[in-house]
Image (tube, rainbow, N blue to C red):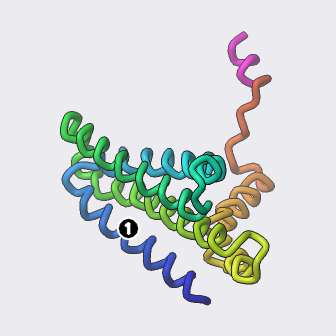
């Protein structure tokens, strides 16, 4: 394992622990933060190249800047929304906060690894080393989840995928 493996694992564990503890007061804030971080990750991934060309900055700075700034804005919005809603599931707050904390941690870890790949260049030796890491394969590609889901599909234990034809059959 390399330095980035330990860094990503550390980031993920710290975020999960912090979010689980924070969620004891109500899981709604952690849910809103998880939704927002996913949206910020999608935004940064979608627009960083065009933004870097438009304002003449490096792609790495555009990627990190868009994600961090949009995440800060969303975390403020999530806090305001949570003050109004106060969503809570009572005794299940810690459990759901843990689940949504995993989503937040996975998203931040994913963005950190993407930043490193953009920083070093996608075809460079360091980026290849990052891409071959077992931790990176889990964070970026959900390797274990995909393998488990494929196994369940072969055993016919997974839910059947919903297709437009099945939706039309149920409607008739």
For the point 70% across and 76% down, the residue is 127
For the point 76% across and 49% down, the residue is 156
Which quadrant of the figure has residue 124? Answer: bottom right
Looking at this rendering, what residue extends furthest in the front direction? 56
Is 13 situated above or below 23? Answer: below
For the point 49% across and 81% down, the residue is 7
Residue nearer the viewer, 34 or 46: 46
Residue 81 locus on image (x, y percent) = 26, 37
Is 127 situated above or below 102? Answer: below
Residue nearer the viewer, 121 or 56: 56
Residue 163 locus on image (x, y percent) = 76, 30
Q: Say what secondary structure mark 1 lies in.
A: helix
Is 55 situated above or below 112? Answer: above
Which quadrant of the figure has residue 14? Answer: bottom left
Q: Is residue 15 left or right of residue 26?
A: right
Q: In this view, does 6 lie to the left or right of 47?
A: left
- Provide the residue span drawn in magenta: 166-172
Whether the magenta-drawn stretch holds residue 16 is answered as no
For the point 71% across and 74% down, the residue is 131
Task: Give the quadrant of the C terminus.
Answer: top right
Is 123 situated above or below 105? Answer: below
Task: Give the quadrant of the N terminus.
Answer: bottom right
In the picture of the structure, the residue carrying the numbered disc 1 is: 15
């Amino acid at each position: 394992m390399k330095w980035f493996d330990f860094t990503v694992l550390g980031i993920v564990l710290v975020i999960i622990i912090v979010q689980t503890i924070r969620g004891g007061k109500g899981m709604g804030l952690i849910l809103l933060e998880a939704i927002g971080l996913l949206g910020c990750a999608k935004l940064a991934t979608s627009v960083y190249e065009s933004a870097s060309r438009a304002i003449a900055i490096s792609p790495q700075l555009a990627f990190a800047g868009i994600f961090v700034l949009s995440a800060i804005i969303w975390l403020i919005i999530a806090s305001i929304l949570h003050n109004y809603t106060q969503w809570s599931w009572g005794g299940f707050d810690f459990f759901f906060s843990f689940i949504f904390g995993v989503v937040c941690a996975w998203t931040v870890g994913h963005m950190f690894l993407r930043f490193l790949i953009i920083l070093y260049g996608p075809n460079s030796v360091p980026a290849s080393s990052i891409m071959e890491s077992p931790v990176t394969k889990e964070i970026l590609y959900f390797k274990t989840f995909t393998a488990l889901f494929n196994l369940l599909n072969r055993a016919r234990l997974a839910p059947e995928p919903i297709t437009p034809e099945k939706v039309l059959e149920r409607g008739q």
